[in-house]
Image (cartoon, rainbow, N blue to C red):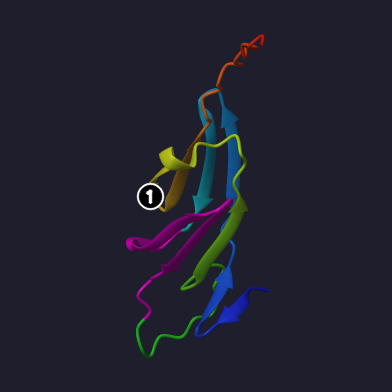
Amino acid sequence: MPKRMGKRPRVQPPADFVERADGFYLYLDMPGVDKEKLLLDIENDKLSVHAKSNFGLTAGERVHSMEFGEVEYYARFEVSELVDKEKVSAKFENGVLTIYLPKREEVPPKRIQIEVL
């Protein structure tokens, strides 16, 4: 049962997490969300997603069954040190938020010269 926050239930959107050679991809299913009501933040090692769906129910309508509807989506994820946080990007298309978390470029080991005194 979703937790209620105000008038809307708060739910965690279904998510898929995929690793590819260039980075990690996080897909979140959020039907009914307008791009303007979608917030994505990274703070320290936490990625948070917050959005509100809008299906335009009007006064006088009686809902007989609802498996999704006007909800507040919220999800929070740990961001690995393998991710280049400065290059994270996102796109929102057809109700699916795709977050790209690129892998950091590996820094080759550095040989340190020892000074002889």
The secondary structure making up most of the magenta span is: strand
- Residue at 38%, 90% (x, y): give it: 60
- What is the x, y in percent for residue 85? 48, 42
Q: Quadrant of the C terminus?
A: top right
Q: Nearer the viewer, residue 102 or 55?
A: 102
What segment is highlighted magenta in the picture?
Answer: 31-57
Q: Nearer the viewer, residue 115 or 66?
A: 115
- What is the x, y in percent for residue 53? 42, 68
Question: Could you tell me which secondary element the residue under label 1 belongs to?
Answer: loop
Residue labelled with disc 1: 94
Residue, far left? 36
Q: Nearer the viewer, residue 13 or 65?
A: 13
Q: Nearer the viewer, residue 53 or 82?
A: 82
- Residue at 52%, 30% (x, y): give it: 104
Residue, far bottom? 60
Q: Quadrant of residue 40?
A: bottom left
Amino acid marked by disc 1: Asn
Total numbered labels placed on residues in the image: 1
Q: Is residue 14 above or below residue 87?
A: below
Q: Quadrant of the N terminus?
A: bottom right
10 left or right of 31?
right
- What is the x, y in percent for residue 2? 63, 73
Q: Quadrant of residue 21?
A: top right
- What is the x, y in percent for residue 105? 51, 25
Q: Residues within 10 Å of mark 1 (few under 14, many from 20)?
A: few
Q: Is residue 66 above or below residue 43?
A: below
39 within the magenta span: yes
- Residue at 61%, 11% (x, y): give it: 113
27 within the magenta span: no
Q: Is residue 100 above or below residue 117?
A: below
Q: Quadrant of residue 3?
A: bottom right
